[in-house]
């Protein structure tokens, strides 16, 4: 058993709170962590709901005061799972209080907020305090294997990438209005929610940054029935009242990569039959890779040097030699969506204990935010090439 | 919060112990169980290892005495995860002690043991004590949906089934000897380990029993290098000493189903590239179904009534309306191998609290055992049709 | 242009006549044949229909007298496309008349007929006359590539094969009676029609013969409405009269291969959604292969030596370096069902001109017939292992 | 037998000449055409090569003078298979000579040429003379079925389309220079060659025109070794001399459709493993469709109204009820690349005999050309939205 103990406070208790809780709860059961992890406090807005969440998800205490929680001496890590408009405030406060921070993606709703967060992370880093942003899809074993192949040069130079993230829950024009369709609450629509994932994925896999974009955002259905009751992500529609949709249904953009390659990106919520369809393909001078989140235990790899017997290899990334897999089950025993949250815990706790910088960094999160911002600027400027820019 | 508390003792702490622990630990975090579940005691052979397992997997206590544990008044459920040759002894003792029993598959290594277990379960049932066997693949949502379609008559009469369970860890003739290749320890090879799953799957999906079989079992590699150290399911081979393989590498059999249909079954450990390749197809008079464990969130369904637009539908079984799914993640967020163990906990605890018979029953497990036994008898009798028989 | 001319007479003008005509007509347009081929005579039963067929398919003359046609001095090759019960009579007569013979599969309806044909072929061979049986699926480029990989030892020793040929046109119990369901006309049902293909495929790919079988044949629907008019392979059903089905709907059997491996075979016409579903998988000690006729430009190949990046390679067998492909289109331009008939012409004409034995030989066809016969014997004998036997 | 005879002259004898010849030769063998078709004259540059082509492909005569051939009274149809820079001259001359014209895609190398061709087609139409452009992928049965579903409203309003055409023969930077990489000969690179196909495909399937585009074209390898000898589409590279590549390797663009939807397009020759990877997906308000040319007998269709059993249906478009299929083989017997050329002959000859306008028209071809032109203009203008424009 490790000597060190790290006590965690999680702020937020929605869908992401459930997923993060599963990560904190499960990681120590399968991996040998360098520290003992304690699920100390969950923080929410209302007292009863937060108490219930603490009980349900397995946190020792519930609180409705995130500032007081952050100030506690017995808290080492703050896990930020609140909506995006609160990411910067909570994260910066936590870093300033000397707590390690894990912040859900996207890093922030605006570039300015993200920049402030990076500044706070840099300042905190000088004192050994770590900050990390939660792009958990990086931690799918197949994605890690893909990155290893690219980093080893097995694909040669990257010429093209095509990345889509397709969902369908808004394809019906009568699907009801929710807070996710209100810009003041959600920041943006498919662009920020789904686009952030595929931008990070391409930047991570290629090891290159997007340098400029040309794109457009669209809202196909501008008015929707108001919600009368919540059911899952959606709910029951009102038959009489309608609300104004103020975010995008879809975002499409072209991009240039730092290494000279080009890419297409598409994020949408109106593609019937596509439930969580994040799919990325990379084409290099020596080979290609395909990853599909709806088939997440598989990596498809084309090695041009295979000659007359070349073909996309359907690699089942479930061998003990594959990243993260050895801690779980035997070959062919599938992992699911939530396993990335355990891997995130492993990597964060390891980095803290080794006093190393965990990735993705806040700077990585900022770079994604800048791309999304450039897409909106390009869309407003006739789809013209728009520089992503940097600090 | 439920009033009732059920305290569990798990006997065994290997691969299945890890999987069952994950089920006990996770189910209450996602489902609203009718009872509070406590992971009370884990039982193993050696003191240090069992203590470590208790800590790792989250059990309150460790014990090396399963009889004493079973005798405790504060234990309600005994979860039997020991090797097959101990299933009957532990299960029967637990049932006689008035404990509800969950026994891992296969129910037993012999028909006689399985019959004794069914008798014990029947006797216990008279006192409200429940017994269930752990064919967890039944609890994959896609499998449940398949069963619903068959039960609703959407496939019509079942004419044919073909079921394979393919693995590859013994395809290399120099893969080392392990206890799994020793009949005295393992009972049988691919037949009992993998064949049991596909027999149960076909019987469950069709709602019909296998009535007779014609089959053969094979051992391709009869001598293998002895193991010098354990690594995962396999290990490091000795260069000098070799041991005798006394179980089958593969089992192939034809079968008749109670409803008049026929089936082919194949279980093997020597199919390169097939890692956990359980695949079942059913053909009825009105449609077909395909399930593949290596793509477990999907059910393929052909509805002949779709006419000119008929085609196998690749149903992503991740909608809130699908069995078990509503408790987990939004559509398209994949479940993995281990989720079946949580579903098993849900169903067992629910049945106990409702005083209903959980399924699969010990009788279901016995029916599988009888099929496997008939395959071995048929194999020894020139592959002749051999009745499965019944009590 | 080649000096030599080979003039062909085709006996039969049904589905196979159309397919063979397409082969004779097309092969010289893409391949450089060593002889000029002339489509001289088509022979059918009725005068008008045969004249129309000659015109439609591009034969110079029509005849209703196959004996007279075979006797003509200006005919070099006789292409036998009549129903199976006439194969032996026409083929033997043609061989005795000194004509090269291409006979459609299956070689004959009985082993005795097939043996007589082999004897005739042997006698003719002494005079340089060639005989070949038309298992055209051997000539799909992906199948040839598969054979090359096996022959080169890339799969190691073959341990298991599983082969199915699934169709669905009889899955509806009210699908009408046709001559194909009458044993006196058709010989057998799925066994001879579909089973012959998969037996030949496994024997060809492995280079091994089936040595014994254990199997069963089934007829699920024993009475069907009589046909009132012909439409395609099926027709319009009568509402009042019903006929007796005297052939099998499905045949399932286990097999042993000459090299020590085992196999499962299944041929059926009652699998909804499976249209022409011939699928074969081979598992060797070093790798695996999968071929699927419904995706016929693809070969899936698992090379265990690919290590951590191993996965089934989806090889698109459309490169100029692949068998037969160089004569057709650029990479990725798909070939279809009928191309095998052109390849068959190429191989037969080449063998004749080089005075070499074309394959598959009549002996190959006989070996398939013996397997089918053994399956029927085993089925009648309680599925017992039944030797295939040899001359 | 039809009374009418249509005599065809084909100008050009390369890859497309071979494909068109196969269409003219084969269509009458499977379809009942309303006219007898004669393959009268093939026209090429050099006498010997053209004579050989006539013999090989089955044309009655060879000529090196296209003007003289067009002037012949006994020619009814001129089939234009020359390189794109000659399309307008030959087509216009043929139309003015009163011949029906089938012109290979793309219609022309420039918008101006295409406009002149449309004017000539319009003038000729007044005299009953037909003009048609050869986008044969429209005539794949699965594509026709897709169009039928969209036209019937089964997809609802089209919201998004994504279309790629991926090849890999230039992914190796040392692949040699050919005339296809020289702008003066080829007009453009991937954009015109591959992009034309996907633009036509999306416009055909949706029944909508692209109204504006925002795009970019790229050349990754600007110098390549000179070709020393021709081998297939490529050849042997020189080790010393290098030539300048003056066309694009890849073109990527966003588009708006006439009905309010948006689309992404990508055409590239540098995607390893993608051989002829034309893939199109349409998302409507009620469903989605996917077509993949590397699996061309299949249409994937998602019908949102299938409810809990909804999933992409893998429709094997090989039923007699499917477009064109009834003339060929039984269900599940695959068609290939070249069958579209027979279907094209059927549709052209039928339209001529019925005195109807065949499609795609020259105006359809012009609309594609305008899109490609707009992409080049957008690329030169910072990827800005650029109107496609119309006459």
Image (cartoon, coloured by chain):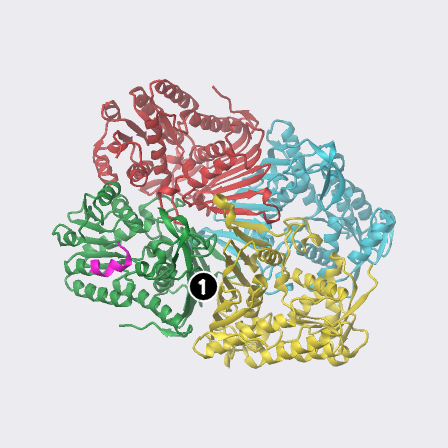
Chain colours: A yellow, B cyan, C red, D green
Residue at 54% from the left image edge and 53% from the top image edge: A300
Q: Depth check: D55 or C382 in front?
A: D55
Span of residues in magenta: D82-91
B261 left or right of B61 in image: left
In magenta stretch: residue A290: no
User: Which residue is under mark 1?
Assistant: D287
C361 left or right of A345 in image: left
Q: Depth check: D186 or D337 in front?
A: D186
Q: Depth check: D368 or B113 in front?
A: D368
Q: Is residue C298 above or below residue C355?
A: below
Quadrant containing the N terminus of chain B in the rendered view:
bottom right
Q: Residue furthest left?
A: D73
Q: Position of residue C170 (x, y in %)?
A: 43, 42
What is the quadrant of residue A46 in the picture? bottom right
Q: How many marks?
A: 1
Q: Position of residue A191 (x, y in %)?
A: 53, 72
What is the quadrant of residue A114 in the picture? bottom right
- Kindly tell me whether residue C321 is visible in this rendering: yes
In magenta stretch: residue D88: yes
Q: Position of residue D171 (x, y in %)?
A: 46, 55
Q: Is residue C106 above or below residue D277?
A: above
At mark 1, the secondary structure is: strand
Q: Position of residue C279 (x, y in %)?
A: 49, 41
Dominant SS in magenta: helix
């Amino acid at each position: 058993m490790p000597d060190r103990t790290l006590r965690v406070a999680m702020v937020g208790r929605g869908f992401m709170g459930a997923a993060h809780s599963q990560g904190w709860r499960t990681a120590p059961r399968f991996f040998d962590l360098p520290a003992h992890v304690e699920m100390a406090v969950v923080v929410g807005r209302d007292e009863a709901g937060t108490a219930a969440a603490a009980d349900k998800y397995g946190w020792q205490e519930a609180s409705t005061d995130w500032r007081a929680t952050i100030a506690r001496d017995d808290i080492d890590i703050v896990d930020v799972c609140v909506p995006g408009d609160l990411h910067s405030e909570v994260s910066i406060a936590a870093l300033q209080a000397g707590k390690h921070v894990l912040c859900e993606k996207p890093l922030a709703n605006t570039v300015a907020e993200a920049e402030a967060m990076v500044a706070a992370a840099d300042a905190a880093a000088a004192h050994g305090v770590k900050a990390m942003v939660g792009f958990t899809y990086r931690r799918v074993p197949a994605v890690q294997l893909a990155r290893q192949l690219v980093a080893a040069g097995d694909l040669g130079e990257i010429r093209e990438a095509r990345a889509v993230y397709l969902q369908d829950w808004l394809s019906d024009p009568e699907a009801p209005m929710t807070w996710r369709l209100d810009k003041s609450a959600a920041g943006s629509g498919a662009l920020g929610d789904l686009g952030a994932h595929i931008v990070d994925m391409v930047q991570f896999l290629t090891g290159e940054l997007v340098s400029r974009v040309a794109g457009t955002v669209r809202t196909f259905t501008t008015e929707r029935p108001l919600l009368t009751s919540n059911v899952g992500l959606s709910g029951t529609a009102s038959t009489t009242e309608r609300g104004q949709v103020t975010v995008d249904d879809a975002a499409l953009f072209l991009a240039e990569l730092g290494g000279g390659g080009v890419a297409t990106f598409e994020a949408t919520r109106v593609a019937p039959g596509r439930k969580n369809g994040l799919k990325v393909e990379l084409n290099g001078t020596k080979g290609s890779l395909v990853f599909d989140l709806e088939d997440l235990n598989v990596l498809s790899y084309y090695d041009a040097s295979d000659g007359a017997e070349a073909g996309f290899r359907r690699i089942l990334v479930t061998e003990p030699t594959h990243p993260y897999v050895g801690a779980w089950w035997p070959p062919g025993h599938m992992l699911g969506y939530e396993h990335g949250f355990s891997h995130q815990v492993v990597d964060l706790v390891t980095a803290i204990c080794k006093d190393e910088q965990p990735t993705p960094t806040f700077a990585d999160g900022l770079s994604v935010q800048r791309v999304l911002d450039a897409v909106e600027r390009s869309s407003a400027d006739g789809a013209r090439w728009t520089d992503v820019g940097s600090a």
